[in-house]
Image (spheres, rainbow, N blue to C red):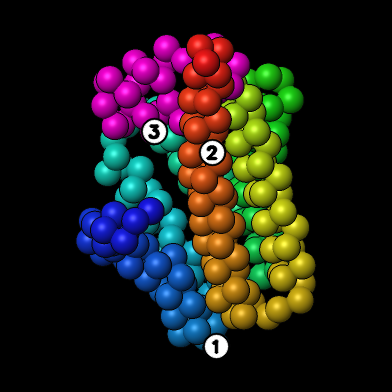
Amino acid sequence: MHRTQLTQWLRQRGPVLALDLAVNFALPVLVYDRTQARWGEVDALLASSVPPLLWAIGGFVRNRRIDALSIMAMVGIALSILAFLGEGSAQLLQLREKMVTLLIGLAFLGSAAIGKPLIYPLARATVARESAEALADFDAKRNDGLLRHAVMVMTLVWGFGLLADVAVSVLLIFSLSVGQNLVVGPILGYATIGGLTLWTILYRRYRTRHAARARVAPDA
């Protein structure tokens, strides 16, 4: 991404990103810090989870789309709500919250195992939000061998990447205090999603250049 594009992106998405960080990072830490002494670890941890959950629900309602992306978001919200049910320690609650990431990671790998990589409907939903022309071009390449290979690789990388996030998170849950994990956990989550997203962008560019060369080579 060139400097001009980065500046434009920050102008467009910067305020939303800042609010996202405040709701999902700063606010949970603040809520936990202010309520832990009076309510105890478990209830304070539950209270700190409310702002991110409401933010996710608000985003789903705001988009008002029923496609693969919105369904994935809805499933994540439902799993997050289920994580609040039941009793147990603060560590157990944190483990239940990571079940969302675990199940989504397994869904990626399971879809790859049956030959229906989950990245394809997610990518299609993303393209559909751009324009009808882009969607038509994407659908026209549905059976392209290079596209199918790239989608499979992306699905596997996202699946294993999310499982790696879960493995590291479990270690952190049992190694750090609840308050410390409220700070470190979101950083790990943002790093995981950011790293996978960056890899996806770079890999997509690489596959696009590779496909262009492959189509030109026979003519040459």
Residue that label 2 marks: 206
Residues in magenta?
121-147
In the image, residue 105 lies at what x, y percent? 66, 42
140 relative to 128 in the view: left or right: right
Which amino acid type is shown beneath numbered disc 2?
Tyr
Location of residue 136 with respect to 127 vertically, above or below? above
- At a point 71% along the width and 70% down the height, the residue shown is 173
N-term mark: 2 or 1: 1
Location of residue 25 with respect to 13 vertically, above or below? below
Assign a secondary structure to mark 2: helix
The label on residue 142 is none
Question: Does residue 58 show up?
Answer: yes
Q: Quadrant of residue 115?
A: top right
Query: How far apart are the two marked residues, 2 and 1, measured between alpha carbons?
Result: 52 Å
- At a point 22% along the width and 61% down the height, the residue shown is 11
Residue that label 1 marks: 37
Assign a secondary structure to mark 1: helix
149 relative to 164 in the view: left or right: left
In the image, residue 93 lies at what x, y percent? 65, 62
Q: Residues within 10 Å of mark 3 (few under 14, many from 20)?
A: some
Q: Residues within 10 Å of mark 1 (few under 14, many from 20)?
A: few
Residue that label 3 marks: 126
Q: Are marks 3 and 1 in contact (CB under 8 Å)?
A: no
Q: Residue furthest front?
A: 220
Q: Nearer the viewer, mark 3 or mark 1?
A: 3
